[in-house]
C-alpha cells in the first residue's frame, strides 16, 4: 500500500491562514453545500449521508446515517455536536474548531435540515479558548450571513445554533454525559439502555449527537454526493479521516488520509507524514486509536487504517489518534500516565470506575517508583477484570459508561506485551529508564 | 376518582397484568414496569444492593446489583435495579460472572472505606458491614493509602457528615431532591474525590434531614442526637405511631437502659412510606428531659410541693367536687387532651361528661376547627388525596404543621401529576407545586370558595385563561373524562385552619360552600395536634360524645352506657376561658394543655386562668399554665404507655410502650379512673385494653374495630374508622414496602383505608436499623399470637383478655411473628359485627354555622395572618436540646409596598399593635400579598398570640415606627 492522491475533505481549506473567517470560507465554496441541501428534500440529504456510509468520527465509529434513521418522531428534536475533545493525544477536532469553524457550522446546519431539527448545540471543550472564540465569531458571522436562524437563505427552514463551552471534564465528552452537562447538571453519563439519544436525549427529547469531524464532512458529501464519498476508502471505512499522530515520530501532527488505503507504517514512516521514529530509534509499540485502545506492537504495523481491520486485530481505530512509542519508552510509565488521566477524569458516579481507577493508578505508580511486588501484576489484572470482565476486546464492563473499560486497556496490554519490563521494575526496585 | 380498591401500594393505579421472567431458571411473576431487583426479591431471590431504595428512583450507581440479563447478544452484566422486567426475560443472579462482579464491587467500596466500624454509629446495623459479611472477601488486597477527608463535619444542627465513610450511593441526595424538594446536599468533586456535601452558606436546613441518616447505608450521615449514644445490639425496640403531629407516621421506638435513644420511620404504605419529619424523629429528647414532672404536686401558698398520689388525687377531687357542689357541673371545664391516646381520651371524656357532668370539654385550643366540621364531613384517606382528580388545599402550611402529609401530597403533585388547587392567604411550601394558587384576603375565603365552585358558564372570559382561578376552574371542569365529577366525585379537600388570626367559622363557611357544591367530595382534616382526631372521636369536644355522635342524639345511648350525660351543650376553649374570666366557670382541668402559651389569644387566656379558682393540671412538664395550677398530676408520656392513636384520616394505630416513665408518673386514663373513684364514680377500667374494649362496644364509629383486629399483623398500618360497609380483604403475600398489589373482595364505600398490605419482612437495606434487629416488635396489646396458618385466635371483645396489673413494670414485648410472603390466608375487614340496634345513634353530620360579616379592611392597618411553625418556643420543642435552637424568633413579614406606604424600614424593628403591642423585626417579602402581615405563633413571649382577639372574625394590626 501507499499514499493515495485523494484530496483532503475537511482540511482542504487549512492551508490558508485566515481559514476561520467567513470571507475565506465563502471564497472556498463555503455554504454551497448548505444551499444545495436546502434545495433538496430533507430525506434526500439523509439518503446522501447514508450512501456515504460516513462512520462517526468520535471514536465509536457508528454510521452517522444509521444514527439519524433511529431518530424518534417528535415535534421537538435536538442536534448536539460534540466538540468536547479532551483525550490525551487526540487533537483533530481542536484543529478543525480553530481553523475551520464554518465547516462545522455548515455541517451542523445540513444535519439539522436533514433531520428537521430546530435547535442545535455545538458543545466545545472549555479549554479551547481560541477555538471557542473563533467558533462563536463564526456563528455570529453565519447568522449575519443568513446561514443560521430564521428562514435560512430564504428556504423557509429555520434552526438556531448555540455554542456551549464545556466546564472542564473529560466525561462531558461522553455522549450522555454531554447531554446532562448541557441540561445544567453534573456530567454523569446516563445508564444504557436507551443506547441512543435518538430515543431519549436532551431534555428527554429525541436527539442526534455527532462528532465535529463528522459534521465537517457533510458539506462535501452534499456537494459531491454520498457515492463519491463512499468511493474513497474501502469496505465500511469510507472517505478520508484526520489522523492525529503523536509520540516519538519526527513529524507529529494531524494528517487527513484516505481511509483503508494507507497503513500505520505509511502514517508513521512516510517522509511526508510521520517521517519515522525520532533520533533514529526503533518502534517499540503504538496505540492505534486513542489512549483507551489496546496497544499494538511493531508486528502489526502493516495493518491498514481501516476500522474493521483494526477491530479484527484486537484494538480500535477509535478517535483516529495514533501514539507512537520508541524503544527508550518505559511502558510502565506510559501506562501509568494514561491510567492517571482516566483516574483523574472518572466522574465518580459508579463504583468500579470511581474506586478502581484510583487503585490501579496507585499500584502502577508504586511499581514505576520501585515499590512493586510480584503479586501486583496479577492483582492489577484481576482489578482490571472487575471493571472489564474477561479483559477481552471489545470489552465488557461493570460500569455505566465506557470510561470504565478504558481504564484497564493500557495496563492490561502493557502487562501482556511487556510483562518482563514490569518484572524488572519490581526486581530492581527502580525504573530501568531512570 | 381513582378507586382506592384498585389502587396499589401508595395508591398507585393498580395494574392487574402480570408477565413472567426467569430468575435462575425459575419462572417468576412480575408486574409491568417494575425493576428486575424488585420482582426477584418478591420471588425470594435477594439481589444485593446499596443505592437502590424501593421508595426512590433508581440510579444504578453502586453496581452491587449487577446480574446477567440475556439480551439479543447473549447474557451481559446489567444493574438489576435499572432494568425493567420484560416478558420472558432471563436473569442469572448466581453465576460465576455475577459473583465475581459483585465481589469486585464490594471490594471497590471497601478500599477507601475507613473500616472504623468499632467507633461508627452504624456498626451492627450497617448494610455495608452486613453485605461484606455475606458477599465480601475476607481480607483486603488494598495496601495503598486510603482517601482522607476532614471528618465529621456538621451539615446542619442535626446531621453530621463523615465523607470518608460515604459510598456515594446518592440515597441522601435523591431523598433531599426527589422527596423533600430541597436539593441542599449534592455531589461535589469527581472520581474518588467525589463527596456529598452542602453548598457554601447553605446548611442542610430541612425539616426532613433525619431521613437521610436513616437511609444512609453506611455511617456517613449520623444524627447528632443519637451519635455515640448506643450500639445497635443494645437497643430494644417496639413498633409504634408517632404523635408529634396528627399524620400518624409509623415508627420504631428504640431504647437502651430505659432511655429512649432513637426513632426510625417504618415503611407504612398508606401513611408515611418510611419518612419522618425531624421534629417527630428527635422529640424523644423531651421524654428523656430532666425537666419532667415526676411526682404529684399540690399548691401550698405560692409553692407547689411534692405529695403522694393519694393526697394529690384527694386534693383534686375535693376541689372539683366543691366547685361542682357550689356552681353545678357547668362550673367545671376541661381543656386539652389532644396529646392523650384514644383510651385515655375516652376515660377523660367519661370522667368529665359521665361523672362530673360537664360538657365544657375541648381538646382544641382555639386553633382548630369545630368538631362537627371535622367529624361531620366525609373523610378522605391520604392515599385518596394522593390520587385525587383535583386536590383542593384550604389549610395551613402543611410543611410546618403536618410535615409528612406535605411529603405525600408533594409527591402526588410532582410525580403523579395530581392537580393541586390551593386557597391561601399567603404562599405556603405547597404553592410552588400547585397548579393554581388562589390568594384571598383574610376573611374572604368563603367568597373565593364560591367563585371556585360557581357553575361553568358559556361566557367564560376568553383570552384570560392564565388567571389562577381560570386554571383552577379548568381543572375542575375538564372534559376529557380525567377530571372530577360535577358533584365533586374525585375531589379531595384538605381542610384546616390557614390562619388562627381568622375565626374558625370563616373556614367553616368555606367548607359549607365546597361541600354544598360537591356532595361527593371527600375531606382530609388538617388539624395538627397529635391525637386531636382521636380526642374528637372520643368526645373531648363540646356537644360530642364518644364515637362521633352528638350530645342530644346520643343522650339515651350514653345514659344507658354511662349512667349520666351532661344536661346541655358546653363551651369550647375560648368559651371556657371567657366564662372563667367572668367566674361562670370556677374550676379548670388542663389535660396536657398550656393555654397561657398555646391559646392564640393570650390576653383571654390570662384572664381565664386568673379567673379560675381551682386548676388541676395533668401534665408532663411544669409550664406557664401548669405552674399556676393548684394540683399537678404527673402524666406518662409517649412510649411510656400503650394504647392507640388516631390520625387525620381517622386511622387507628397502635402505640407501643418502650420505657417506664420517671418517678411515679401514670398514664392519663389511670389518673382519670382514680379521680373518678374519688368523685364517687367508677369508670369500670382497670387496664388500657379494657378501655379499648369498652370503646369498641360503646362508640358507634368504632364498632367492630376490636383489639383482635387492631392487633392483627395485617393491620399494622392501622384501621380507618368507621369500618367499611362492604368487606375488604387485607392482603397477604405482600411486604413493606412495595408489596404485591392488594387483593380485594370488594370495594370500600367509606374510604376506609383497609387496603394496605400486611407487614412483610423488612429489607434491611431499605431501612437500616429496623431490619437489622431481629424483633419487629408488636406493641403489647394483649392477644394471642397468630397461629401458623395466620389465624388469630379469637378474643371475646367484651372480656378483658389481660386483667393483670397495669403495664408499669417494663414492656412485656409480645413477640408476634411478622406476616411474611409465606403466610397463607388473609384478614377480612367487614362491616361491624354488632347487633343492629335502633338505639345506636347516627354519626354527626356537618351543619355549617351561620356566616358572620367581616369588617372592611382599614387602609392604615394590615390584616394579620398567624401560623404555627414546626419549631417554636413551646414546652415540647424547648425540652429537646437538639431542636430548641432551631426555633426561629418571631418577626413580621409584609409586602414591601405596604412597608413603604407605612414608612417602615425592612430589617429594622417596629411596634406592632393588635390586642396588645409588641416590638419585633420586620422583613419585606414580595410573596406576602398587599394588605397582609404574617406573624408566627411562638408559644412563648412575643408572638402573634399577643395580638389576636379570638372573638373577632379577622384581626388587624398597626405598625408604629420606634
Image (spheres, coloured by chain):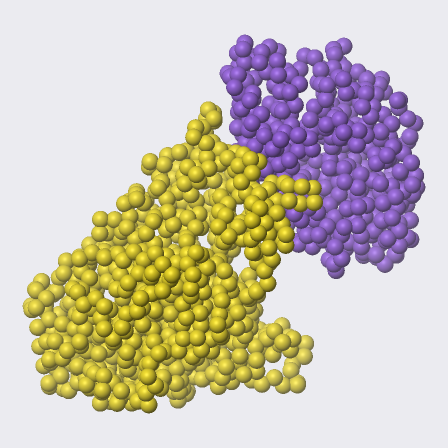
Rendered position, A59 above or below A297: below
- Which residue corresponds to the image point at 72% horizontal and 28% vertical from the top-left? A315
Chain A display color: purple
- Residue at the spot 11% in from the left edge and 86% down from the top edge: B326
Residue B8 visible to an observer of this rendering: yes
In depth, the one of B127 and B528 nearer the eye is B127
* Residue B20 vertical placement versus B579 (above, below): above
Rendered shade, chain B: yellow
Residue A181 in which image quadrant? top right
- Specify whether residue B320 is in view: no
Q: Is residue B189 left or right of residue B787?
A: right
State the image coordinates of residue B477 (x, y, percent, origin top left).
Answer: 60, 79
Q: In which quarter of the image is the N terminus of chain B?
A: bottom right
Q: Residue B218: x percent and y percent?
A: 42, 42
Q: Which of B140 and B371 is in front in this view?
A: B140
Identify which residue is drawn at 58% across, 33% down: A387
Q: Quadrant of the C terminus of chain B?
A: bottom left
Q: Which of B494 and B331 is in front in this view?
A: B494
A222 vs B498, left or right, is right
How many numbered markers are drawn? 0
Please state which of residues A25 and B281 is positioned toward the viewer in this rendering: B281
Location of residue B523 in the rendering, given as x and y in whole percent from the top left corner: 45, 76
**Apparent side of residue A384 relative to residue A33 in the rendered image (left or right):** left
Residue drawn at (54%, 31%) of the image = A356
**B316 vs B885: above or below:** below
Question: Is residue A132 depicted above or below B331 in this figure?
Answer: above
Residue A242, picture quadrant: top right
User: Residue B897 location, x and y as percent?
Assistant: 49, 68
Amino acid at each position: 500500500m501507499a499514499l493515495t492522491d485523494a484530496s483532503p475533505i475537511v482540511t482542504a481549506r487549512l492551508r490558508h491562514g485566515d481559514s476561520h473567517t467567513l470571507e475565506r470560507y465563502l471564497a472556498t465554496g463555503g455554504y454551497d453545500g448548505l444551499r444545495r441541501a436546502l434545495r433538496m428534500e430533507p430525506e434526500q440529504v439523509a439518503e446522501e449521508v447514508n450512501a456515504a456510509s460516513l462512520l462517526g468520527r468520535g471514536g465509536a465509529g457508528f454510521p452517522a446515517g444509521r444514527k439519524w434513521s433511529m431518530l424518534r418522531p417528535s415535534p421537538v428534536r435536538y442536534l448536539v455536536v460534540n466538540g468536547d475533545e479532551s483525550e490525551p493525544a487526540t487533537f483533530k477536532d481542536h484543529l478543525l474548531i480553530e481553523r475551520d469553524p464554518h465547516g462545522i457550522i455548515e455541517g451542523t446546519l445540513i444535519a439539522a435540515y436533514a433531520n428537521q431539527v430546530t435547535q442545535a448545540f455545538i458543545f466545545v471543550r472549555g479549554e479551547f479558548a481560541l477555538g471557542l472564540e473563533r467558533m462563536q465569531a463564526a456563528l455570529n458571522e453565519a447568522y449575519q450571513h443568513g446561514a443560521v436562524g430564521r428562514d435560512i437563505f430564504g428556504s423557509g427552514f429555520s434552526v438556531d445554533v448555540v455554542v456551549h463551552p464545556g466546564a472542564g471534564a473529560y466525561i462531558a465528552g461522553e455522549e450522555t454525559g454531554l447531554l446532562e452537562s448541557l441540561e445544567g447538571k453534573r456530567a454523569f453519563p446516563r445508564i444504557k439502555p436507551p443506547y441512543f439519544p435518538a430515543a431519549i436525549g436532551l431534555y428527554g427529547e429525541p436527539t442526534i449527537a455527532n462528532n465535529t469531524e463528522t459534521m465537517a464532512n457533510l458539506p462535501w458529501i452534499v456537494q459531491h454526493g454520498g457515492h463519491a464519498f463512499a468511493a474513497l476508502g474501502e469496505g465500511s471505512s469510507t472517505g478520508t479521516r484526520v489522523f492525529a499522530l503523536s509520540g516519538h515520530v519526527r513529524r507529529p501532527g494531524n494528517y487527513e488520509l484516505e481511509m483503508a488505503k494507507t497503513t500505520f507504517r505509511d502514517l508513521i514512516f512516510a517522509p511526508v507524514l510521520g517521517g519515522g521514529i525520532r533520533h533514529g530509534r526503533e518502534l517499540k509499540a503504538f496505540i492505534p486509536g486513542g489512549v483507551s485502545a489496546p496497544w499494538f506492537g511493531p508486528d502489526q504495523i502493516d495493518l491498514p487504517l481501516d476500522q474493521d481491520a483494526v477491530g479484527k486485530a484486537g484494538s480500535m481505530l477509535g478517535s483516529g489518534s495514533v501514539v507512537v512509542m520508541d524503544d527508550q519508552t518505559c511502558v510502565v510509565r506510559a501506562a501509568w500516565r494514561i491510567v492517571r488521566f482516566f483516574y483523574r477524569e472518572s466522574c465518580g458516579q459508579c463504583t468500579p470506575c470511581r474506586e478502581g481507577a484510583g487503585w490501579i493508578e496507585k499500584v502502577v505508580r508504586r511499581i514505576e517508583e520501585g515499590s512493586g511486588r510480584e503479586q501486583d501484576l496479577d492483582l492489577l489484572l484481576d482489578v482490571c477484570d472487575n471493571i472489564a470482565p474477561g479483559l477481552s476486546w471489545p470489552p465488557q464492563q461493570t460500569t455505566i459508561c465506557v470510561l470504565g473499560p478504558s481504564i484497564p486497556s493500557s495496563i492490561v496490554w502493557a502487562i501482556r506485551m511487556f510483562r518482563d519490563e514490569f518484572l524488572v521494575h519490581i526486581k530492581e526496585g527502580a525504573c530501568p529508564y531512570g | 376518582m381513582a378507586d382506592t380498591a384498585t389502587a396499589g401500594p401508595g395508591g398507585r393505579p393498580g395494574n392487574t397484568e402480570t408477565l413472567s421472567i426467569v430468575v435462575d431458571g425459575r419462572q417468576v411473576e412480575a408486574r409491568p414496569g417494575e425493576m428486575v431487583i424488585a420482582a426477584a426479591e418478591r420471588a425470594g431471590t435477594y439481589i444485593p444492593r446499596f443505592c437502590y431504595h424501593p421508595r426512590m428512583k433508581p440510579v444504578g450507581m453502586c453496581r452491587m446489583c449487577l446480574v446477567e440479563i440475556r439480551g439479543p447478544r447473549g447474557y451481559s452484566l446489567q444493574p438489576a435495579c435499572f432494568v425493567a422486567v420484560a416478558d420472558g426475560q432471563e436473569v442469572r443472579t448466581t453465576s460465576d460472572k455475577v459473583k465475581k462482579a459483585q465481589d469486585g464491587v464490594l471490594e471497590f467500596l471497601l478500599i477507601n472505606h475507613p473500616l472504623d466500624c468499632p467507633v461508627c454509629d452504624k456498626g451492627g446495623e450497617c448494610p455495608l458491614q452486613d453485605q461484606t459479611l455475606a458477599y465480601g472477601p475476607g481480607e483486603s488486597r488494598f495496601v495503598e493509602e486510603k482517601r482522607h477527608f476532614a471528618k465529621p463535619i456538621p451539615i446542619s444542627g442535626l446531621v453530621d457528615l463523615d465523607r470518608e465513610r460515604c459510598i456515594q450511593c446518592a440515597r441522601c441526595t435523591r431523598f433531599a431532591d426527589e422527596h423533600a424538594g430541597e436539593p441542599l446536599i449534592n455531589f461535589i468533586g469527581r472520581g474518588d474525590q467525589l463527596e456529598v456535601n452542602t453548598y457554601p452558606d447553605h446548611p442542610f436546613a430541612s425539616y426532613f434531614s433525619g431521613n437521610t441518616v436513616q437511609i444512609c447505608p453506611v455511617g456517613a450521615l449520623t444524627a447528632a442526637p443519637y451519635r455515640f449514644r448506643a450500639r445497635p445490639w443494645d437497643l430494644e425496640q417496639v413498633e409504634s405511631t408517632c404523635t408529634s403531629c396528627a399524620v400518624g407516621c409509623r415508627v420504631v421506638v428504640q431504647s437502651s437502659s430505659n432511655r429512649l435513644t432513637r426513632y426510625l420511620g417504618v415503611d407504612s404504605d398508606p401513611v408515611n412510606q418510611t419518612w419522618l419529619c425531624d421534629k417527630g424523629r428527635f422529640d424523644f429528647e423531651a421524654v428523656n428531659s430532666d425537666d419532667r414532672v415526676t411526682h404529684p404536686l399540690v399548691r401550698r401558698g405560692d409553692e407547689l410541693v411534692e405529695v403522694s398520689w393519694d393526697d394529690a388525687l384527694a386534693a383534686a377531687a375535693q376541689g372539683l367536687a366543691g366547685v361542682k357542689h357550689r356552681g353545678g357541673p357547668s362550673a367545671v371545664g376541661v381543656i386539652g387532651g389532644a396529646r392523650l391516646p384514644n383510651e385515655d381520651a375516652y376515660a377523660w371524656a367519661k370522667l368529665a361528661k359521665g361523672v362530673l357532668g360537664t360538657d365544657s370539654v375541648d381538646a382544641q385550643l382555639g386553633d382548630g376547627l369545630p368538631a362537627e366540621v371535622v367529624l361531620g364531613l366525609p373523610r378522605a384517606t391520604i392515599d385518596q388525596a394522593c390520587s385525587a382528580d383535583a386536590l383542593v388545599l384550604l389549610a395551613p402550611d402543611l410543611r410546618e404543621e403536618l410535615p409528612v402529609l406535605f411529603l405525600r401530597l408533594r409527591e402526588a403533585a410532582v410525580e403523579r401529576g395530581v392537580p393541586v388547587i390551593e386557597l391561601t392567604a399567603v404562599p405556603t411550601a405547597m404553592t410552588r407545586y400547585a397548579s393554581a394558587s388562589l390568594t384571598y384576603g383574610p376573611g374572604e375565603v368563603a367568597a373565593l370558595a364560591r367563585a371556585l365552585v360557581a357553575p361553568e358558564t358559556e361566557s367564560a372570559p376568553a383570552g384570560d385563561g392564565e388567571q389562577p382561578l381560570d386554571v383552577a376552574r379548568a381543572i375542575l371542569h375538564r372534559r376529557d373524562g380525567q377530571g372530577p365529577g360535577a358533584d365533586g366525585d374525585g375531589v379531595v379537600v384538605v381542610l384546616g385552619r390557614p390562619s388562627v388570626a381568622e375565626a374558625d367559622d370563616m373556614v367553616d363557611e368555606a367548607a359549607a360552600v365546597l361541600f354544598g357544591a360537591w356532595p361527593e367530595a371527600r375531606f382530609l382534616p388538617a388539624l395538627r395536634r397529635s391525637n386531636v382526631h382521636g380526642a374528637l372521636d372520643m368526645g373531648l369536644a363540646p356537644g360530642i360524645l364518644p364515637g362521633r355522635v352528638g350530645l342530644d342524639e346520643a343522650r339515651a345511648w350514653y345514659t344507658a352506657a354511662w349512667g349520666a350525660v351532661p344536661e346541655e351543650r358546653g363551651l369550647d376553649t375560648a368559651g371556657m376561658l371567657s366564662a372563667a374570666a367572668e367566674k361562670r366557670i370556677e374550676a379548670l382541668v388542663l389535660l396536657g394543655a398550656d393555654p397561657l402559651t398555646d391559646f392564640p389569644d393570650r390576653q383571654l387566656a390570662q384572664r381565664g386562668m386568673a379567673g379560675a379558682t381551682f386548676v388541676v393540671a395533668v401534665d408532663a412538664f411544669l409550664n406557664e399554665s401548669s405552674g399556676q395550677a393548684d394540683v399537678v398530676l404527673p402524666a406518662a408520656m409517649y412510649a411510656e404507655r400503650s394504647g392507640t392513636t388516631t390520625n387525620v384520616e381517622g386511622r387507628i394505630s397502635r402505640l407501643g410502650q418502650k420505657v417506664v416513665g420517671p418517678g411515679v408518673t401514670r398514664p392519663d386514663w389511670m389518673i382519670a379512673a382514680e379521680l373518678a373513684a374519688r368523685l364517687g364514680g367508677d369508670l369500670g377500667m382497670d387496664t388500657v385494653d379494657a378501655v379499648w374494649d369498652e370503646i369498641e362496644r360503646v362508640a358507634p364509629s368504632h364498632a367492630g374495630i376490636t383489639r383482635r383486629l387492631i392487633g392483627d399483623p395485617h393491620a399494622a398500618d392501622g384501621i380507618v374508622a368507621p369500618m367499611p360497609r362492604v368487606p375488604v380483604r387485607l392482603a397477604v403475600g405482600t411486604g413493606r414496602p412495595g408489596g404485591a398489589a392488594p387483593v380485594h373482595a370488594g370495594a370500600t364505600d367509606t374510604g376506609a383505608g383497609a387496603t394496605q398490605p400486611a407487614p412483610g419482612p423488612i429489607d434491611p437495606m431499605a431501612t437500616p436499623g429496623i431490619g437489622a434487629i431481629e424483633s419487629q416488635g408488636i406493641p403489647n396489646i394483649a392477644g394471642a399470637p397468630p397461629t401458623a396458618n395466620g389465624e388469630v385466635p379469637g378474643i371475646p371483645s367484651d372480656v378483658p383478655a389481660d386483667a393483670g396489673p397495669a403495664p408499669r413494670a417494663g414492656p412485656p414485648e409480645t413477640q408476634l411473628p411478622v406476616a411474611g410472603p409465606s403466610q397463607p390466608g388473609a384478614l377480612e375487614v367487614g362491616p361491624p359485627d354488632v347487633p343492629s340496634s335502633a338505639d345506636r345513634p347516627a354519626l354527626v353530620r356537618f351543619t355549617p354555622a351561620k356566616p358572620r360579616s367581616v369588617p372592611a379592611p382599614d387602609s392604615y392597618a394590615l390584616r394579620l395572618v398567624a401560623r404555627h411553625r414546626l419549631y417554636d418556643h413551646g414546652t415540647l420543642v424547648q425540652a429537646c436540646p437538639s431542636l430548641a435552637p432551631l426555633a426561629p424568633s418571631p418577626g413580621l413579614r409584609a409586602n414591601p409596598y405596604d412597608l413603604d406606604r407605612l414608612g417602615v424600614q425592612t430589617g429594622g424593628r417596629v411596634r406592632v399593635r393588635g390586642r396588645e403591642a409588641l416590638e419585633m423585626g420586620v422583613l419585606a417579602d414580595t410573596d406576602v400579598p398587599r394588605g397582609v402581615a404574617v406573624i408566627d405563633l411562638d408559644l412563648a413571649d412575643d408572638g402573634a398570640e399577643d395580638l389576636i382577639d379570638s372573638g373577632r372574625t379577622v384581626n388587624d394590626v398597626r405598625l408604629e415606627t420606634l
